[in-house]
Structures are given as structure tokens and as C-alpha cells.
Image (cartoon, rainbow, N blue to C red):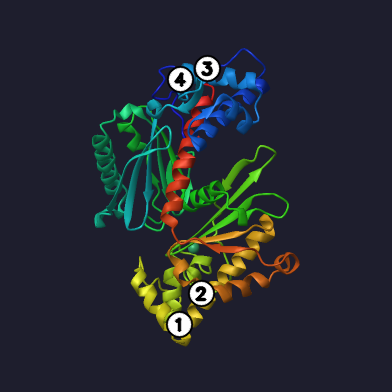
Amino acid sequence: MRNRSLLPGAPDAAVPANPVRPGTELLRRQNLRSVLSALRLNGSLSHTDLSSLTGLASATVTALTADLEKLGAIGREEQTVAGVRGRPRVLFSRSAAFAHVVAVQIASDALHYALSDFRGTLIDRFSLARDAMSSRPDRFLAEMAGALERLLQRSRLHPSSIALLSLCSKGIVDPEGGRLLWSPVFGRDPVDFQPLLAAFPQAALGVENETLLVAQALSRRNLPQLAGPDGSTGLVALSLGHSIGLGIARSEGPGGVLSVTAPNFGHMLNTVDNRLCRCGAYGCVEATAGFYGILRLAFQVPENTIPAKFVPLSEMEKIATAARQSNRMAQYAFRQAGLTLGQGLSRVLSLAGNLPIVVTGPGTRFFDLLKAGMEEGLSQSLHVRLNGPPVIETIPDEQSLVFEGHLDRALTAVDERLTASR
Ligand SMILES: [Zn+2]
């Protein structure tokens, strides 16, 4: 995320640094983030609950909440219980209007816009089909600028109340530079989103990989079936569709700090063959396991042609129906896709350790046809033979995962910026 100096809600916003050693200051910022994060995940909390959830001493919580109240980032509310005498209970919560975030998901067929307040409450959300002309970056940016203006007008918010404009896409992103470096839609034409910030004087810019956000959301859902036998939590998110995405989430250290990455799995070389990938290379995972790879094999299209820029789901359903009715080429295509995914995943597990796998995206509709190949591909590696096959779960609703992960990551970034020194 590229930083601007201040947050909208507070004219002199960064939490004032005390004249203390750098290590102490770092710890204080981390503690401030813990308090903000606990309030975001739980809504309103009493002093006692904040202390037990964050593991911070009571006096520390008093000092931190006082700082955050002074900034306007959190507020307090006194709750009197009817019929009970004595002091009212004080509950802290994040101040909804302190800052806002705009989250935009750039999908191949549509753009999904969302606006949330500082508490994480959704204020507005709409989707727009992509303009056919907008495969040119300049046209695309103009289209986005118009939609962002509409989002602000509908909510009647002042542009300076937006603290973060966060975008996500499939492909390879440059989060620091605010750019999309390679994507299925624009290919190698980089898209620089910085010009969009002109309309938001106080906002920082974030660009994230879409499947990284899926991994982030899954780790927040804290699915018990994904916890490792040693109490560790981590998972691999695999997105199946026209392209193939992968995210790895791990919770590290005693405080469970979440770290999420999105290695370039879809365009990892799987096998030296003649299957041309949309990226221009041969033998990528996607060239066999992406929708167009499956279609190409099923219809015996020459391997060095890219069948279509976008394969409609209805076409894939037809191939799947044929495979389920024992059409041999259709079965072969899905099996090859499964095998490629299994082999690729076995490499990921060899490098990252034994993690459970969650499969999501439109390709989960065909999981029955992919499963046997996937298991075979996984079992070909020594790692899986020694450790046993990974737990694999499917969660088809990718859209909700992307959205959840996006807001979570965006608000975490706003908290980080708020607590960072100037
Ligand atoms: Zn590729």
C-alpha cells in the first residue's frame, strides 16, 4: 500500500509517538492494532473483554483506548442495565464515520464496487458489467473513475473521508506500486491505478491478488477442520475457473500473526509440453487446468492455440455433462486438469509443509470429474506418500470469500496506517 501521510478522520492523525526507545514504540503500535482488530472482529467490547481478548494488561488497555478515543478512532457508550444499581458498563467500539474504504474487485466480466465504514459495515455495493472497449487500460481507468464517482454520490460521502482505495484482480500485482503487472484481461499491459487517487485526496492505494484475499477470508473463518494436528493454522486456497489462483495463509508466532501470500501457481511450469498458455509460455498449470485448457483438450483443438479469451460456464457444463455420460475425450480433459492440479499442489506442499486445501471458484462444479486426477497427482510425490494426503474441502462461493477477505485486509491496512509513525 502506498502511503499518504494522514488519515481523513483525524487532521493530525498518526498516534503521537512517545519519546521512548524504538522497540517500545513498535510494541505500542502493535498493541494499538490488537485493540483495533479486537473491536473490529467483535463489535463493542468492555475494558475487561478487551484485556482478555488481546492478552494486554488492564493499565495498558486504559492507555491505548484513551489514545484511540483522543484520535476519534473509537468511542465509548455507557450501558445501564435496568434494575441494576451501580456504575454503568462502558463499551468501546470503532467509530463508524472515522474513515471509509472502497473495495473494487476487477473480474473478467464485471467490476464489483463496495463501500464500507471504519467498523466494516457495508454501506453500498454494486456491480457493473465491463465495457467491451475497456480492455484498453486508459478506457478501463476512465470507466472505473466514473463508477467510483457514482459510489461516492450515492453515499453522499466527502471524497476526503475515504482512507483506502483497495483493488483486487486475478494475475500478478504490484501492491507497493499500485499496479497490475499481468492479468488475464490486459495481458502484459501494466495498469497503473495511481491516477484514480486524484479523486480521493486522503486515500492510500492498495492492489491485491484475488486468491490471496480468499486465503485471508478462509483463515478468518477459522474453520476447525482446517486446524493442523499440532495446533498450527494454515491453509492453501485454490481457485478454479478460467484462470487458476493460489493463496497460502499461515498464522505465525504466539500472537497468531496472519501472513498471506499468493505465489504464481497458475503460471508455474508444470510439464514441458506444447500446451500454450495465455501468458505466452508453454506447460503452465493453467494451460491444462484452466477452463480453456480443459476445452482445448476435450475438443482436440491444437495445443498451441488459445481457444477463446473467455469460456462461458455453459460451455464447460456441456463438456462436464459429456464426461459424466462417459465421453472419453471429455473425461480425459478433466482428468488431465486434475492430474496437473494434483502435481502442482504436491510441489506446493513439499515447499510449504502439510497444509489443508480449500478449493473454490466456478471450477468446483466439476470437482467430481477432477478429484481422481488430483489425488493421483498428489500421491505421486514423496511428501504426500510420507505425510498422507492433505484434507481437501470445497467452498463454491468464491465471490463471498473475495469480498470478506478484501474488506478484512483493507481495514487491517487502514489500522496499520493509523498506528504508523509519520
Ligand atoms: Zn502461463
For residue 368, the mark is 2
Q: Quadrant of residue 375?
A: bottom right
Cβ atoms under marks 2 and 3 closer than 8 Å: no
Say whether residue 144 is left or right of residue 389. left
> What is the spatial separation of the Cα atoms under label 1 and label 4, in whole angstroms?
60 Å
User: Of all residues shown, which one is farthest toward the front?
Assistant: 83
Say whether residue 383 is left or right of residue 137. right
> What is the spatial separation of the Cα atoms under label 2 and label 3, in whole angstroms?
60 Å
Location of residue 209 with respect to 385 vertically, above or below: above
Query: For the point 53% across and 47% down, which residue is it?
Result: 216
Say whether residue 107 is left or right of residue 157. right
Image location of residue 182, percent across then percent down? 44, 53
The answer, for residue 15, to whether it is visible in the render is no
> What is the spatial separation of the Cα atoms under label 2 and label 4, in whole angstroms?
53 Å
> What is the spatial separation of the Cα atoms under label 4 and label 3, in whole angstroms?
32 Å
Image location of residue 370, percent across then percent down? 52, 73
Q: Earlier in the sequence, mark 2 or mark 3?
A: 3
For residue 87, the mark is 3
